Amino acid sequence: MSNTLDHKKLDRLAEVAVRTGVNLAKGQELVITAPIEALPLVRLIAEHAYKAGAALVTPIFSDGQITKARYEHGDEESFDVAAAWLFKAMGEAFSNGAARMAISGEDPMLLSEQDPAKVARVSKATSIAGKPAMKPIVGFEVNWNIVAYPTTGWAAKVFPDLPIDEAQAKLLDAIYAASRIDGDDPVANWAHHTNELKKRVTWLNGQKFDALQYTGPGTDLRLGLAEGHIWKGGASPALNGIICQPNIPTEEVFTCPHAYKVDGWVSATKPLAHQGTVIENIAVRFQAGKIVEATATKGQDVLRALLNTDEGASRIGEVALVPHSSPISQSGVLFYNTLFDENASCHIALGQSYADTVEGGAVFLPEELQQKGANQSLIHVDWMIGSQSMNIDGITLQGTVVPVMRAGEWAF
């Protein structure tokens, strides 16, 4: 655990995570999950949370070496076991009004040498057991937030040619810049940024597109949109009334695709770091919403295992638009972390849709959401498909074609 990271930058990141990210309310509990290496940031978050009037801060830590020990020494049966009791307790906390914060920063290569079948089994078991904790997040019932900490394993992957202390410091600088914390008043920075995102949201919602057409290298895709879909982006009110900024950073506006109305080819423009493996050069073909062909030059077995998690894993639950000129894209840093890389590029997400991206979705039953076209799955995995060569058109119900993006930039 490095002691050389800039304390002032970590402290400001913690303050923004509490004040702008989760926007913790006085008297509210906060549940934090984090890699053990992120303890310095978690401690600072706890300080700012208590300054904001938190009733209780409860951290839950994970450790990469303990995770690897399971794969290297665990019994065969252990790979179908997950801590259901823990997720039930987290779900109960959220039901009682607790806020949720997650610290991202796991080593993207942690499980790269492990059996993909075992990794897939653990992922599926965890997804099933985790439903009580995920339901309030997917339904946006509580205020929640994700921020990042530059762990050693992650830093070594992003900046492999630097000594580890320098790599961590450089990754913190990249996180800091991407998270819009530069300047005298990062809270005001975020308020301005949210207003800019809302302008995009307002225009897109006014168009009421029936579908989007993507064209670019390796991509010719018609993506239908769910009935009553709502574009969202930036800070939004959770169902508990608290306005929060779920992702720091964020550059996207997003909505709900129609799980059964996606056809054509699409290719990834960035690697996908998933479950300790980096999957490279993904190319898939959709037919009636379902992926019927899938290849990757690296990690193909992990990709295919992911697609076989359940019926909804081979369909998509989110579509997001991000200009190529986003600060994260322009930084030139490949983060190998979806929280950052998805904000450098237009992307789609395999699996579960978000109920609040469908009009009235917060009160709909899963079957009612499915009738609107919203996907249901145990997974939600974003992967990047945008580039400076991507063109996107909106198609109305009447068949009118409206330019949305040209050469990776907004066309309106």
Image: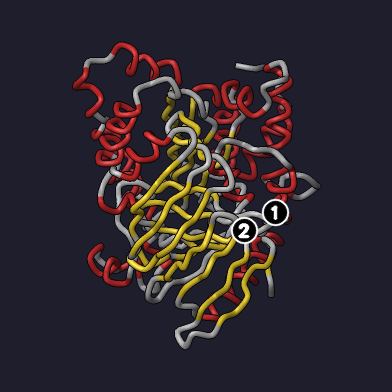
Q: Dot 1 lies on which element?
A: loop
The answer to whether any part of residue 234 appears in the image is no
What x and y, as percent, mark residue 7?
71, 27
User: 260 left or right of 142?
Assistant: left
- Few, some or many residues within 10 Å of mark 2 (<14, 14–19, 20+): many
User: 392 left or right of 225?
Assistant: right
What x and y, as percent, mark residue 55?
45, 41
User: 107 left or right of 295?
Assistant: right
Looking at the rendered image, the quarter that the C terminus falls into is bottom right
Q: Mark 2 points at which residue?
A: 322
What x and y, as percent, mark residue 194?
64, 62
Q: Mark 1 points at which residue?
A: 326
In the figure, 182 relative to 273: above or below? below
What x and y, as percent, mark residue 159?
68, 26
The reply to whether callout 1 and callout 2 are in contact (CB within 8 Å) is: yes
In the figure, 177 relative to 298: above or below? below
In the figure, 352 relative to 237: above or below? above
The answer to whether any part of residue 15 appears in the image is yes
Dot 2 amino acid type? Val
Between 5 and 16, the one nearer to me in the picture: 5
- Few, some or many residues within 10 Å of mark 1 (<14, 14–19, 20+): some
Dot 1 amino acid type? Ser
Q: Dot 2 lies on which element?
A: loop
How many callouts does the rendering have? 2
Q: Residue at x 23, y 22 (%)?
A: 78
